[in-house]
Amino acid sequence: MCCRGPWSPACSCGCCIEGLPVLARWIVLRADGLRSRPRRRSLPIRKPDWRKPISCGACAMDNPENNAQLDIVQQRWRDITLPEARRVLLALAEPLSASALISCSARPTAAGAMVATDCGNVYIKRYHASVRDACTIHPYQRYVAWLAGHGMNVMPFLPFDAARHRGADGCTFTVGSYVYEVCAQAPGEDRYAHALTWDPPATLDEARGLGETMARIALASRGFDEPRAARPDPYQNRFGLFAAGDFDEEFDGWLDARPSVRRYLERTGPDWRRDLEPYRAYMRHVAPRYGELPESWTHGDPHVSNMLWKGHAPSSVIDFGLADRNTALFDLVEAIERNAIQFVQIMDGQTDACRSDVARAIIEGYERLRPLSDVERDVLPWMLPLAQAEASLNWIAYFVDGPMRDEDADWCYDTAFNAHAAWFGTPDGRRFLDDVRRAL
């Protein structure tokens, strides 16, 4: 137990482990060179053949030690083939002829391929309908079109020919269990193509450029009033559940709307009420004021690898698959969380792997174009430990319903939900939050 009673983010004694949640203890144990798994999980579900990843190899990420922090971002879906790409591109309203596959995506959430055509390179993304259908894709496609019309360098999606092809619906094309979208190749250098989520930008000038880009997105998003989708899906990166006035009532309804997450929690049996306790200290500071912020659509995953670069700044923004309606501040919080906190290294025991200078530079760049309000300055540091809480739980449904990998769902709960939040209560995490406060 801590000198102040049960562990909480307010504890600053730095001497206790016993009062920490299981995964906070796990961080400390790993820092001492030990590895422990907190509880036995159910056996993995047997996966149908279409879920087996078949990779081109060159795009696959090296992970010789089977590090769980790297395994979670490994490819989960088979590659798009050239014959497949040809069929998809011929279904466009202005058909294209595919000549070669340039590269394939090694990401876990969808299949993707850059394809050479008679009219330049295009990018094809393929989702599986078990986790995302056309109706959940169209809102973010409309958002991208809005941004393109309001000065952002983003690539709108290309329409398919519904008159000639069954399954064509606007800018999506459904064939059996797959849903496709296509856009032109974005301009810029893909200098972070092999970066991990949570890898920082190489320079502080790039961090400032990233901050400016997030401000431009916020400004360009004004007036895009499409509401949140009523039906949840695993790709939604939302912030709201952990800013609710009555969290317990809200959480029960949230689980009702996501039966796969509820079943997972019931089947694996974590003490999730106890695991929620560290979050409550942060929620008390966010909930009273978050509702004062105007709603806005957000990118949802503003990592350096989702930007194409020219010089010290992004020249294009790509991958809006996690876009949703939140507040503009959420994208800034996400930019700090994604680029200034190196959670892969932290989970492997290097608990000081965070970059206050990067966080400060992102904020500086952002405020050059969009100064923060007093409310935003007040709640931003408290939002950081909460930033991925809702998304981490929501991703459980993706890994259970899509790739059918219980071990990945375990990572979402044990690591992304529990251990990442616990880090903010460690001395290194508290110092980082204090540095962010001083930067505001």
Image: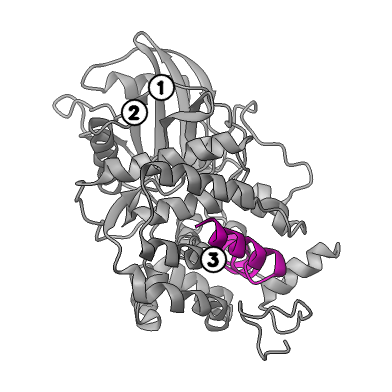
Q: Residue at x 71, y 57 (%)?
A: 346
What is the number of the mark on residue 385? 3
The stretch of residues the image draws in magenta is 411-440
Q: Residue at x 22, y 31 (%)?
A: 149
Numbered disc 3: secondary structure: helix
Marked residue nearer the N-terminal end (3 or 1)? 1
Residue with the mark numbered 2: 155
Mark 3 → mark 1, Cα distance in angstroms: 35 Å
Numbered disc 2: secondary structure: loop
Residue with the mark numbered 1: 185
Side (left or right) of 18 relative to 389:
right
Q: Which of 142/86 is in front?
A: 142
Residue type, mark 2 in image: Met
Asked if the residue under mark 2 is in contact with the one under mark 1, i.e. CB atoms within 8 Å, the reply is yes
Please, what is the dominant secondary structure of the magenta stretch?
Answer: helix
Numbered disc 1: secondary structure: loop
User: How many numbered marks appear?
Assistant: 3
Mark 3 → mark 2, Cα distance in angstroms: 32 Å
Q: Residue at x 31, y 47 (%)?
A: 133
The stretch drawn in magenta includes residue 328: no
Q: Residue furthest right?
A: 33
Mark 1 neighbour density, 10 Å: few (under 14) some (14–19) many (20 or more): some
